[in-house]
Image (cartoon, rainbow, N blue to C red):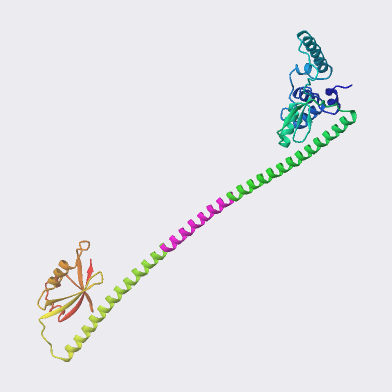
Amino acid sequence: MASDQDTLIGMGFPQNRVLKALKATKNSGLQPAMDWLLAHSDDADIDDPIGESAGGTLGGSSSSSAPAEAGATSGDSAEQEGDEIQDGEQTAQSLICQDCQRIFRDAEAAQRHAMRTEHVNFAESTQVIKPLTEEEKAAKLAELKQKLAEKKATRSVQDEEERRQNEKLRRKAGQDMTMVKQKLEEQEMKKLADARKREKEDDRKAKAAIKAQIEADKAERARKKQEALHGIQQAKAAEVAAAATAAAAPPKVYTETRLQLRLPNGVAVVQTFGASDKLEQVYDFVQQHHRSASAPTFHLMTTFPRKVLDGAEREKTLSDLGLVPSCVLVVTNN
C-alpha cells in the first residue's frame, strides 16, 4: 500500500511541500496533511527547502517502522516494569468537537477547525479514524483541487482588482499632479498679466500728468501774453486820448507823470514820478526794486514810437523826454 507521502506526491503536490505537511502534522495521516497543504498554499515560504533530517523522519516506510520499533521497545519495557495497559483502560485516538461532534486526528486539525468555526469545546476520543479508501482519496483529491482552483481564481480576481485599483490611483495621482501644475501655471500667468496691466496704467497716468502740465504751462504763457498785450493796448489808447486832448485844449502844465513799467517777466508796475525827475531816477527805481542778480543791466524803451532811452538821455527830465503826464516803458535786458 502506498505511503501518505507517495499518495500526496501522486496527487500532484511538490515533494518539498508534502514533506513539510507531514512534518507539521507529525505524520497524523493523509487528511491532516491535505488540510495543512490547503491552508498554507499561499505562504511565502511554502517552497523554501527544509533540513536534510526531515526526510529521515517523514515519509512512508521509515515513519511506519519507527513507531513499530518504538512500540516493541516500549512493550518490552512495560512488561519488564509492569506498566502495561490493564483491562478497562483506553487510550485517546482522536479529538472530538463537542459543539458539532466532528472528529479530528490531532490537535492541529482541531485548532484549524476552531479558527474557522470559533468552536471552543473539544475533548479526547477513543474513536479511531479509519484510513481513507481509494475512492475517498480520489474524492478528497478532487475536492482539494477544486478548492485550490477556487482559491486561485479568487486570488486572481483579487489581484486583478488590486491592480485595477492601483492603476486608478496612479492615474488619479497623475491627473492631480497635472491639475496642480496647470493651476500653478495659470496663477503665474495671471501675475504676469496683472503686472503688465499695472505697468500700462502707470505709464498712462504718467503721460496724462505730463500732458496736463504742458497744457497748464501753455495756458499760463497765453495768459501772461494776453495780459501784456492788454497793457500795451491800454497804454496806446491813453496816449491817443492824451494827444487828442492836447490838440483840443491848450497845453497844460503837469508836475507829475504816471509811468507803467513792463518788466521782462510780463509783470506791469505802475509808479508816479515828478515831471522834473530825471530818467536816471526811473533806472534807479527799477534797479532797486525789480531787478534780479542774473540780469544786472537793462534798458528802458518806449513802445510808441519805439525808442531806447539810455546814455545821455538819462540826464534829461521826464518832461523833456515827453513822458508826462503818463507813459509806458518796457524794461529790456541787455
Q: Is residue 329 above or below residue 175?
A: below
Nearer the observer, 35 or 166: 35
| Rendering quarter of residue 80 | top right
Residue at horizontal 85 percent and vertical 23 percent from the top: 6
Nearer the observer, 20 or 246: 20
Nearer the observer, 194 or 179: 179
Which range of residues does the magenta coloring cover?
181-205
Residue at horizontal 47 percent and vertical 60 percent from the top: 200
Q: Position of residue 194 (x, y in %)?
A: 49, 57
| Rendering quarter of residue 53 | top right
Residue at horizontal 65 percent and vertical 47 percent from the top: 172
Q: Is residue 72 above or below residue 119?
A: above
Q: Is residue 196 above or below residue 325?
A: above
Q: Quadrant of the N terminus?
A: top right
Q: Position of residue 189 (x, y in %)?
A: 54, 54
Q: Position of residue 235 (x, y in %)?
A: 23, 80
Asked if residue 197 lies in the magenta stretch, the reply is yes
Q: Position of residue 130 (x, y in %)?
A: 85, 26
Left or right, 111 with reference to 62: left
